[in-house]
Every structure is written in structure tokens, then in C-alpha cells.
Image (cartoon, helix red, strand yellow):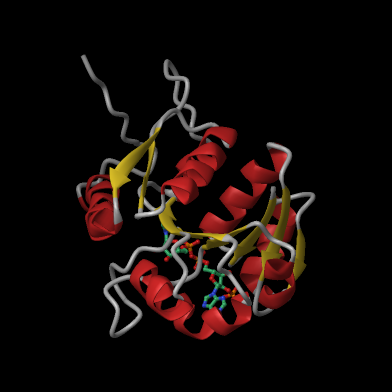
Amino acid sequence: MNIAIIGSGNVGSALASGLHKAGHTVSFGVRNPASAKSEKAATLVTGVGFSTVREACAGADVIILTTPPEAVLALVPELGDVKKKVLIDATNSIRTRPEPYATAFHALKAITQSEKVVKCFNSTGFENMANPVYPGFSGIDMFCAGNDAESKKVAQQLAADIGFGSCWDFGGDDKVELLEKFALSWINLAIMQGHGRNLAFRVVKR
Ligand SMILES: NC(=O)c1ccc[n+]([C@@H]2O[C@H](COP(=O)([O-])OP(=O)(O)OC[C@H]3O[C@@H](n4cnc5c(N)ncnc54)[C@H](OP(=O)(O)O)[C@@H]3O)[C@@H](O)[C@H]2O)c1
């Protein structure tokens, strides 16, 4: 697939690297290719070029947003016509949010009027996105949410492509805020409770 990753920081770099290695055509859409984060991404990620947000999105089937959540308000006009593209929101509105919306997902749906918006790649640390494999497990789990079943299938396929185990369907639009709270649960354990960022969630069933 042709994938535009908006933002070239921790999450953007981890996803770009994994998706490129999985055989996708990936480009970063950035506001400043000379920023410290873009320069670091250029050293970490090979095979992924940088362009403006508008250029990266023009040829993309999938757009993944990896910026601070409030940035989406200014970014939407740059994304172009997104109605036929899958828009994946990897942001978390924990410290800031795109006022007056609860999350970037809600802002994207309301402003673009697209149904093909899905929340994914928000529920674990970027280190786990760069390497989802833990000793003894084939891959940790990822989670996605949103009303559009086809968009969730695309997100689930991309999660599998970069090495996640299952990508659980967390539910519809009504579960997006819960999925952000789930991300906060990871942050709580990893950072606030001091267990470190090398921990991950995996669902077990019997
Ligand atoms: N860090 C994690 O482990 C993690 C895990 C899950 C989800 N998340 C979520 O993912 C998002 C990104 O986190 P991160 O750690 O990757 O952040 P980061 O390293 O600070 O990178 C943020 C990127 O967004 C870009 N950006 C910021 N404001 C922008 C704007 N107004 N327009 C265009 N681009 C803009 C930055 O561009 P410049 O280079 O120009 O500054 C940078 O490339 C956040 O919403 C976070 O909540 C983070």
C-alpha cells in the first residue's frame, strides 16, 4: 500500500520503519524536513522519503497521524480529499486535545466528514511499535476502534505486517475514548508506576 505518515517523531519513525520493511511504499509528510525530529528520523529510517503533508497524502491509500492531537486541526486542509483513504489516528489526547473535540479521531471525523477514520497504534509505547516481539511470544497485541469495518481491517493488516500478534477490534466510535484510556493504562504502568517502557499487553483466552 502507499502510506503517508504525518509526523516523523517517535511513533512516526517506528511505524515508517516497520511498514517500509514489510514492503509498503511509505513517505513522511512533515512541516519541516530540517527539524531535529525529521533529521533523527532520516538517520533511523532508511528507504522513506520526506515531503510536505500535502504531497505525501496525495498518492496515499492510508494516512497515519502521529502528531500531537491538537495539530490535526491545522493539518486537515493539508490532507486533501480523504474520503477514499483510510485515516489512522495514532494520537492520544492525554495532555492536550483538539478543542472543542474530545480526541483527534473525533476532530478528524467531524471536519473531514469521512467514515474511514480508525483509531490504532495509540495503545503502546513507540518502542513496542518498533519491535512488537517479546521473548516467548510471537507478537504483542494491538487494538483498533471505529465504526468502519473495512478501515479497521486495513489497520489490522498493517499491525500484522509490522509484527503485532492480534489487533483486537475494540469496538466502534463509542470505544475510541476507552482505547485512549487504555493507552493511559499502559503509560500508568510503564511510567507512573515505574515498570519501564519494555512492557506490553497481550490478551489471553480460554
Ligand atoms: N511516544 C509514544 O510512545 C506514543 C505511543 C502511542 C501514541 N503516541 C501519540 O503519538 C503522537 C506522537 O507522539 P511522538 O512521541 O511520536 O511525538 P514526537 O516524537 O514529539 O513527534 C511529533 C511529530 O509531530 C510533528 N508535529 C508537531 N506539531 C505539528 C504540526 N502542528 N503540524 C505538523 N506536524 C507536527 C513534529 O514535527 P517537528 O519535527 O516539526 O517538530 C514531529 O514530527 C502523540 O499524539 C502521542 O500521544 C505516542
109 or 193, which lies in front? 109
In the figure, 128 relative to 91: above or below?
A: above
What residue appears at the point 51 percent right and 85 percent down from the top-left corner? 74
Could you tell me residue 83's position as x and y percent?
55, 68
Quadrant of residue 99 within the rendered picture = bottom left
Q: Is residue 69 visible?
A: no
- The quadrant in which the C terminus is found is top left
Quadrant of residue 184 within the rendered picture = bottom left
What residue appears at the point 65 percent right and 44 percent down from the top-left corner? 19
- Number of numbered discs present? 0
In the picture, measured across the screen, residue 172 lies left or right of residue 135, that is: left
In the figure, 41 relative to 14: above or below?
A: below
What residue appears at the point 23 percent right and 58 percent down from the top-left corner? 174
What residue appears at the point 41 percent right and 47 percent down from the top-left corner? 149
150 or 121, which lies in front? 150
Could you tell me residue 180's position as x and y percent?
28, 57
Could you tell me residue 36's position as x and y percent?
64, 71
In the picture, measured across the screen, residue 169 lies left or right of residue 132, that is: left
In the picture, measured across the screen, residue 195 lies left or right of residue 31, that is: left
Q: Is residue 74 visible?
A: yes
Could you tell me residue 202's position as x and y percent?
32, 29
173 or 56, which lies in front? 173
